[in-house]
Image (cartoon, helix red, strand yellow):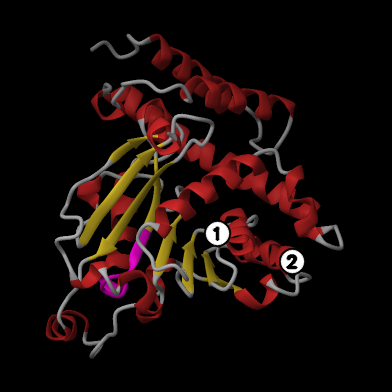
Amino acid sequence: MGCQEEPLVQQVCNLFEQISNLDSLKPSKDVNMLFTQLVFTCMPPTPIDVTKLCKRVQEIRSKLIRLCGEAEGLLESHYSTILGSYQKPLDHLDIFPYYSNYLKLSLLEFNILSQHCTQNGPSKIAFVGSGPLPLTSIVLASNHLNSSTFHNYDIDPLANSKAVSLVSSDPDLSKRMFFHTTDIMNVTTALKDFEVVFLAALVGMDKDDKVRVIDHIAKYMAPGALLMLRSAHGARAFLYPVVDPSDLVGFEVLSVFHPTDDVINSVVIARKYPMTTHSLEQQQGLGPMVLPSKCSEIQAFNPFNHGNMIEDLALEEQLS
């Protein structure tokens, strides 16, 4: 196909040019307007396959994802600073313009997670790439997983400092949310303690980086533990990196869900294949490992429960 044959692709490329010419990506009238236009352009369901676009558009897409990631980080940092000025920051989360989206996404992820965990849910969760405004962890801990502990990993000390200030005044979350300033690639045996690991959409901006992180997590996660990832589908892949099921080596992909509403990210859930103690010792030198109890005690011992079937679910089916 021609490089910019599709009107949608042409529009995205035009917006990319305008965004690239901005002096700063910090929240401002122009920044907000252009990124809002971009989101609304990419949001409608479309059969476009970004992997089949020409090289020039592929390069624009790669640069655009990085610009989106930078702008998103600056937006979250800006609002985290504002929220941190309140005596009780968690009472004012709705000032963040995309808070309602996080409520919907967290509910979606909780419902998907619940299909593969026992009724009590996981006791220990890791969130990789939590950022200065860790809304997913906060919403899940507050609204859905009231007894789980959340270990939030981010490479940026300032982001973690801001995140800590949001929950430190809350008597419940301050005891159940922990923040670790480190590159996840340096986290090894600690990963085996988590029953669920969430990987933020913007950890690994391109395919190679994303696969490298997934492979590292796969190496150290406990057999039977769940990996929750965010991906993108259709034109939304101009905004976020795509996780292909074939990227999840060592995992059984349980489902792939593509929302069609204003929740932008697709949700992928996968389970690390059970391994024998002997093979673990050979590959990692870690000694015997116990399967996480609440999210693997049924399916992890029965590899025939799901096979390798990927369910491409539509939002209408879930709501019907």
Please, is residue 5 above or below residue 201 in the view?
Answer: above
Circle 1 sits in a helix, a strand or a loop, which is it? loop
Q: Residue at x 75, y 74 (%)?
A: 171
Pick whichever, 318 or 14, lies toward us.
318
Q: At which x and y percent is residue 94?
A: 74, 45
Q: Which residue is mark 2?
A: 165
For the point 41% across and 57% down, the residue is: 113
Separation of residues labelled 2 and 1 (CA atoms) = 14 Å
**Residue 90 falls in which quadrant of the image?**
bottom right
On screen, residue 183 above or below 206: below
The residue tagged 1 is 130
Residue 116 circle label: none
Query: Is residue 225 shown in magenta?
Result: yes
Question: In the image, what residue type sits under mark 2?
Answer: Ser
Q: Position of residue 296 (x, y in %)?
A: 30, 71
Magenta-highlighted residues? 219-227
